[in-house]
Image (cartoon, grey):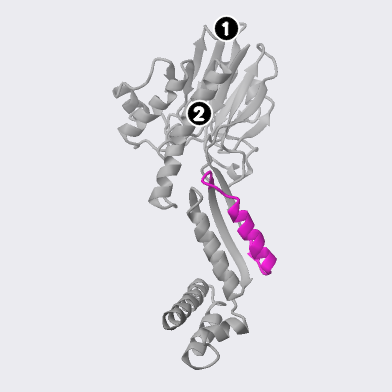
Amino acid sequence: MFSFLHSADWQIGTQFGQFEPEEAAHLAEARFETVRRIAALATERQVDAVLVAGDVFDQQTVTDTVIRRLFGALAGFTGSWVLLPGNHDAALAESVWKRAQRLNCVPANVHVVLEPGVRVFDDLKLALLCAPLTQRNTYEDTTAFFDQAESPDGYVRVGLAHGSVTGQLQELVDSTNPIAADRAATARLDYLALGDWHGMKSVDERTWYAGTHEQDRFKNNGSGFVLHVTLSEPGAVPAVTPERVGKYTWHRWEPEVSLPTDVDQLKANLAELSDADVLRVIVTGAMSLSEAESINLAVEETRARVRALRADTTGLQVLPTDDELAALGAQGGYVAKVVAQLRELQADVSQGRVAAEALLMLAKFQRDVVGATA
């Protein structure tokens, strides 16, 4: 029996520029932490190897410290690691992998595959057919040679590649780095371990994308896992078990609020989040001044509790009630004119967000003035 963990798209060195620096730092660090969890899981499950199907690094220009830290994170598993260059860290003449070799930080049990070919591991009775990317983009199927590649009799035959399976990923129909959908069958593979698609996906019973180990976008596509694959013998159908390893869960919410119960539900949902969550929330609808203020307050309280937050209330109209207008002193005079203008501006797409924020600021200012004179 041969068993291994299949992972991919670690993207070590990702910057997360859409977040605040402190948030981005935590998200970047999690990618190292999750690699260490993969190493611990490999040891716990007593697998024979860990196969990483490309994009170990996010870019060729990561620092030497990042390179050293990545290879240090592998120390928790002393079995064989096989790392495949993908489109982000292609095996160029001068690459992040060449720098790693010059830094002398690649452990003896870590096999970096810089050239296409068959790697034979006699102790594991494994023939590993490897198709590293030697340039960022190609329109040729780098796995085509698998069909003619020879392997020893009685050895498990596993493919390792990085690219887009033709006709399977609708968002990437015309993408670079194509891979034939029937490659596992034509190349007589027991299993084809793929990377590039950041979510977990089964193409067929022998062909899988593991997805990224640590979620990195607001998309519910099964990321944050590794695949534990077991082959009882050559030719057997692989048993594939997803194992959750990711530290953070990313959410994208787009609530539309129009009733007080909508506000209550949104606040209740926000209250359930913790420092294990990353949230993108886009609030639309129309609410009274007090309810809009309560939404903003709930969002800011959530910001202090979750790991990272991106919030957009541009589409939320603020419609003060008569009582709220009276409290603002807006039933006549200059303040009334200002409020009227701001309410009109909310209908303008380019001015709506500023107008809504101005109404909220005016309400706060009026309360502060009342409080100071009380």
Binning the other alpha carbons within 10 Å of mark 2 as few (below 14), some (14 to 19) or many (20 upward) gives many
Q: Is the C terminus in the top left, top right, bottom left or bottom right quadrant? A: bottom left
Q: Which residue is the site of mark 2?
A: 37
Tell me whether the residue at label 2 lies in contact with that at label 1, contact meaning CB atoms closer than 8 angstroms.
Answer: no
**Residue 60 drawn in magenta:** no
Dot 1 lies on which element?
loop
Residue 91 lies in quadrant:
top left
Front residue of 292/125: it is: 292
Dot 2 lies on which element?
helix
Residue 203 screen position, x and y as percent: 66, 32
Front residue of 144/52: it is: 52
Q: Is residue 349 above or below residue 183?
A: below
Residue 372 left/right relative to 235 = left
Q: Which residue is the site of mark 1?
A: 152
The segment highlighted magenta reads: 255-277
- Callout count: 2
Q: Mark 2 or mark 1: which comes first in sequence? A: 2
The residues bearing labels 2 and 1 have C-alpha atoms spaced at a distance of 33 Å
Query: As drawn, which residue projects farthest toward the bottom?
Result: 333
Residue 56 screen position, x and y as percent: 45, 31
- Which residue lies at the image location 62% right of the left edge and 22% below the top edge? 229
Residue 172 lies in quadrant:
top right
